[in-house]
Image: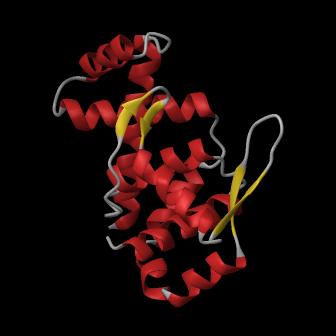
Amino acid sequence: MEGTKRQVVILSLIESMKNCGSWCGETHIQKSLYFLQTMIEVPTEFDYILYKHGPFSFELRDSLGEMRGNMLVDLNSRFPYGPSYRSTETGKALVERYPKTAAMYQKEIDFIAQHFSNLGVAELERLATALFITKEAGKVSIEERAKRINEIKPHISVDVAAAAIQEVEKLVKEFYATSA
């Protein structure tokens, strides 16, 4: 996906997340976009690695910085939690100039926003890591994937990891059932 269209998807996600009550910190954007790209296969083409708090894209972080430099997004200080992102008037105008791109992925964006906007960082980490390991491991049992998550992130117990994997599988089924 070309850079401007990717920015439209990011801006649309931020707006949808805000509409669902998210304060849109970088972690929420990172994890929500990871689910949008990986679980639902919206082709934003960001590279993600498994990092301290789950899947993370340095490329997405750079894009957010570039979007801030181009005045498409702004940061609001949210003491003591850190900044939150919001679309600027320039960002909203960009989305309006690309209505086909915004409309093409809006159902997917809204699904992700509805399911992830109000989750805490720890829950986002568990779920995103569960999706990452599921994609990496392929067709292995939930128990094997849960053990792998626990090996990588010992603060996530095997039982909690298994529950996160089951939640991700449930979300995948829900999305595709509503898309049919």
Residue 136 placement, left or right of 163 = left
Q: Provide residue 136's location: percent of width, then percent of height.
A: 22, 33
Q: Which of 128/55 is in front? A: 55
- Quarter of the view holding residue 153: top left
Q: Provide residue 95's location: percent of width, then percent of height.
A: 56, 81
**Residue 112 versus residue 2 in the image, above or below:** above
Q: Which of 92/164 is in front? A: 92
Q: In this view of the protein, can residue 39 be seen by the observer?
A: no
Q: In this view of the protein, can residue 70 be seen by the observer?
A: yes
Residue at 40% from the left image edge and 38% from the top image edge: 168
Of all residues, the one furthest to the left in this rendering is 139
Q: Provide residue 4's location: percent of width, then percent of height.
A: 44, 76
Residue 116 placement, left or right of 130 = right
Residue 23 placement, left or right of 100 = right
**Residue 38 versus residue 143 in the image, above or below:** below
Residue at 66% from the left image edge and 80% from the top image edge: 90
Q: Quadrant of the C terminus?
A: bottom left
- Quarter of the view holding residue 58: top left
Q: Provide residue 2's location: percent of width, then percent of height.
A: 34, 73
Residue at 58% from the left image edge and 28% from the top image edge: 122
How many tags in the picture?
0
Q: Quadrant of the N terminus?
A: bottom left
Residue at 34% from the left image edge and 11% from the top image edge: 151
**Residue 145 versus residue 34 in the image, above or below:** above
**Residue 52 versus residue 110 in the image, above or below:** above
